[in-house]
Image: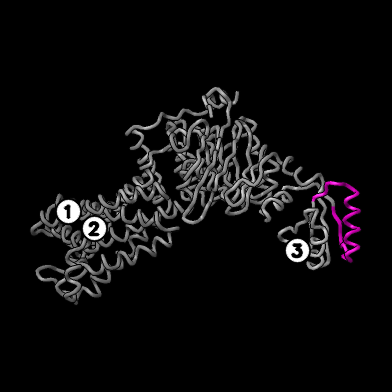
């Protein structure tokens, strides 16, 4: 009796499985994450404030004292700023996941017949879309303070591609952090000490030749510097292929190692 | 257990569930059954293992040992089929604060693989049923505690699941909101939904549950109907109040053979089950008088589930 009335009043649920539903579940989570960004635009604005301050500080305060052989400092600086923007923006991935966990939303999602990949996949994809928007906005900020590209628009777009791929690698790292802490504040706190040596001990703002010898090796051969080099090559010209390859290898390598670990972590929490 | 679609077996069958987190034994072999169309109250103090049991039954956690079958499907072997048959609402009101009420319901509908149109229709129906139609277009962060809890419960009902798991559904709610939620749950049960609810509120279990399972320290301490559990305490309970804790303690010593106990929050009161009627009352008073203990106040009452809890777990929930 009960079973009969249940089956007749239940809404139709599509049968399980299939690649199509995996994609749709991922897209549903992308929709949800982008809706949150739209609903709380402060989040986007806050992610722009920090790089804006850095642009103003380095362009107008420190810039005069930093000499880069063969280029204007603003041209050298802006690709570094783009990388910094993407790197610090990745904290959002960790904060968002940690908050979903803290608020109990992950529990509900785990109890639904959705594709298991969609929580992380939807988050990382939405943050990638967000990165494209933010990098584009920062590009215009650059133009406003005197940044000039010296290649064609296809190469500039390739530079944006390098940045987005770099953001993707970091998103997996921060997804792992977000799943490992208890709330958004803890995620923030865990992220900064990780990012500071990557972003500041790099070639993003200064020429590594002026750094102390023991720091130069690190500053030249780490993913932030690799990304900044590749974006500079794409946007300013010079030998490009090798630099892009190195940065792409970093980004894909980080994704290949950390994505499976993050997925395992999600299944276990 | 045989569980084909047409035999109305138990909607939930848990057998020897064990789960530990490191050193902590959250569940040490818990078994119970919930018959189709009935309500089981899982009652226990904080940390007893109630939430762990719910998380296993909803496929969020896997048990270390034991097995569980929900709506005819094994939670470890066929988790997706279990997920298609259940609704979960929790003490945390697991909704997205930045989405509107309507968007929250759409999200759950879409992730439950309803078509866009059906998810939309269900969202409208549920907002109406839970008196959230006017608030449906506002972000959920603007909702009151009671509204959030209603939205959370609505989200659990999007697919009209035959089995509903409610983890402390009314914790932290004011009495009016609690009453309202009880009415909704009562209505669902009348429609044939099977409900497992965890609660720390004895009144809630007394009011809603057909069967009660008391768990404490990861073990089933008792099970039965509310009436059966109360009967274990005799037909009447006697509460004796003394001027101070010293006299109360002395009274417990004098009356040791009658199973006296302190309520956890009140050391000047002694509660004991009364099996023998008026004769026992006279006996108790005589023995206290002989020991020169003055009774401040004597009170006879029907045993409440609080009394059951006290005698089973030595703690108030």
Camera-near label (2 vs 3) is 3
Query: Does the magenta segment cover residue B157?
Result: no
Q: Mark 3 lies on which chain?
A: B
- Mark 2 burial class by Cα count in 10 Å: few <14, some 14-19, many 20+: many
Callout 1–callout 2 Cβ contact below 8 Å: yes
Report whether mark 2 lies on the same chain as mark 3.
no
Q: What stretch is highlighted in magenta?
A: B273-299
Q: Which structural element holds mark 1?
A: helix
Which residue, given by chain and number where applicable, does mark 3 sit on?
Answer: B267
On residue A156, which mark appears?
1
On residue A139, which mark appears?
2
**Percent x, y for residue B251?**
82, 62
Camera-near label (3 vs 1) is 3
Q: Which chain carries label 2?
A: A
Q: Which structural element holds mark 2?
A: helix
Instruction: Decide which of B182, B243 is in the foreground and name it.
Output: B243
Q: Which quadrant holds the N terminus of chain A? A: top right
**Percent x, y for residue B306?**
72, 51
Q: Distance between the residues labelled 3 and 1?
A: 77 Å
Residue B151 makes an appearance in the image? no
Q: Distance between the residues labelled 1 and 2?
A: 10 Å
Q: How far apart are marks 2 and 3 (CA)?
A: 71 Å
**Occupied quadrant, residue A201:** bottom left
Instruction: Decide which of A124, A113 is in the foreground and name it.
Output: A113
Which colour style is shown?
Answer: one colour
- Mark 3 burial class by Cα count in 10 Å: few <14, some 14-19, many 20+: some
| Residue beneath the point at 44% across and 43% down | A110
| Residue beneath the point at 39% across and 65% down | A189
* Left or right of residue A122: residue A217: left
* Left or right of residue A174: residue A156: left
| Residue beneath the point at 61% across and 32% down | B35
């Amino acid at each position: 009796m009960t079973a009969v009335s249940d089956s007749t009043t239940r809404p139709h649920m599509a049968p399980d499985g299939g690649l199509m539903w995996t994609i749709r579940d991922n897209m549903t989570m992308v929709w949800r994450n982008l809706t949150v960004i739209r609903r709380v635009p402060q989040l986007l604005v806050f992610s722009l404030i920090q790089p804006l301050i850095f642009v103003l500080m380095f362009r107008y305060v420190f810039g005069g004292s930093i000499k880069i052989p063969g280029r204007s400092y603003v041209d050298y600086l802006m690709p570094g700023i783009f990388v910094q923007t993407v790197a610090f923006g990745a904290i959002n991935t960790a904060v968002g996941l940690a908050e979903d966990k803290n608020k109990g939303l992950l529990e509900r999602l785990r109890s639904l017949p959705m594709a298991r990949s969609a929580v992380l996949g939807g988050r990382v994809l939405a943050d990638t879309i967000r990165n494209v928007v933010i990098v584009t906005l920062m590009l215009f900020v650059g133009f406003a303070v005197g940044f000039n590209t010296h290649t064609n628009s296809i190469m500039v777009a390739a530079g944006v591609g390098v940045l987005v791929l770099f953001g993707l690698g970091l998103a997996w790292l921060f997804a792992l952090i977000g799943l490992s802490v208890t709330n958004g504040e803890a995620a923030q706190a865990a992220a900064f000490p990780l990012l500071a040596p990557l972003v500041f001990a790099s070639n993003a703002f200064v020429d590594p030749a002026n750094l102390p010898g023991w720091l130069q090796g690190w500053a030249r051969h780490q993913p932030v510097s690799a990304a900044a080099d590749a974006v500079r090559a794409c946007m300013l010209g010079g030998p490009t292929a090798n630099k892009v390859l190195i940065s792409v290898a970093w980004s894909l390598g980080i994704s290949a190692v950390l994505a499976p670990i993050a997925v395992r972590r999600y299944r276990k929490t | 257990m045989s569980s084909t679609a047409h035999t109305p077996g138990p909607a939930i069958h848990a057998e020897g569930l064990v789960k530990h987190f490191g050193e902590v034994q959250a569940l040490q072999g818990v078994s119970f059954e919930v018959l189709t169309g009935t309500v089981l109250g899982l009652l226990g103090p904080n940390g007893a293992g109630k939430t762990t049991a719910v998380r296993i039954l909803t496929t969020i956690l896997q048990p270390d040992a034991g097995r569980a079958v929900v709506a005819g499907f094994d939670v470890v072997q066929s988790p997706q089929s279990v997920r298609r048959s259940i609704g979960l609402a929790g003490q945390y009101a697991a909704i997205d604060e930045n989405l509107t009420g309507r968007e929250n319901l759409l999200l759950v509908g879409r992730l439950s693989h309803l078509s866009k149109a059906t998810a939309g229709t269900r969202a409208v129906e549920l907002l109406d049923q839970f008196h959230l139609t006017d608030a449906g277009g506002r972000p959920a962060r603007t909702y009151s505690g009671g509204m959030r809890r209603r939205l959370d419960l609505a989200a659990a009902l999007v697919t009209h699941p035959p089995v509903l798991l409610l983890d402390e559904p009314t914790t932290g709610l004011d009495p009016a909101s609690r009453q309202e939620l009880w009415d909704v749950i009562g209505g669902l049960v009348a429609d044939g939904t099977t409900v497992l609810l965890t609660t720390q509120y004895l009144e809630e279990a007394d009011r809603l549950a057909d069967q009660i399972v008391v768990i404490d320290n990861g073990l089933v301490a008792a099970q039965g109907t509310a009436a059966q559990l109360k009967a274990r305490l005799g037909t009447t309970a006697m509460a004796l109040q003394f001027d101070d804790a010293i006299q109360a303690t002395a009274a417990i010593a004098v009356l040791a053979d009658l199973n006296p106990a302190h309520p956890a929050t009140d050391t000047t009161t002694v509660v004991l089950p009364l099996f023998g009627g008026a004769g026992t009352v006279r006996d108790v008073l005589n023995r206290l008088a002989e020991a020169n203990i003055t009774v401040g106040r004597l009170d006879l009452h029907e045993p409440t589930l609080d009394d059951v809890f006290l005698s089973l777990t030595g703690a108030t929930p």
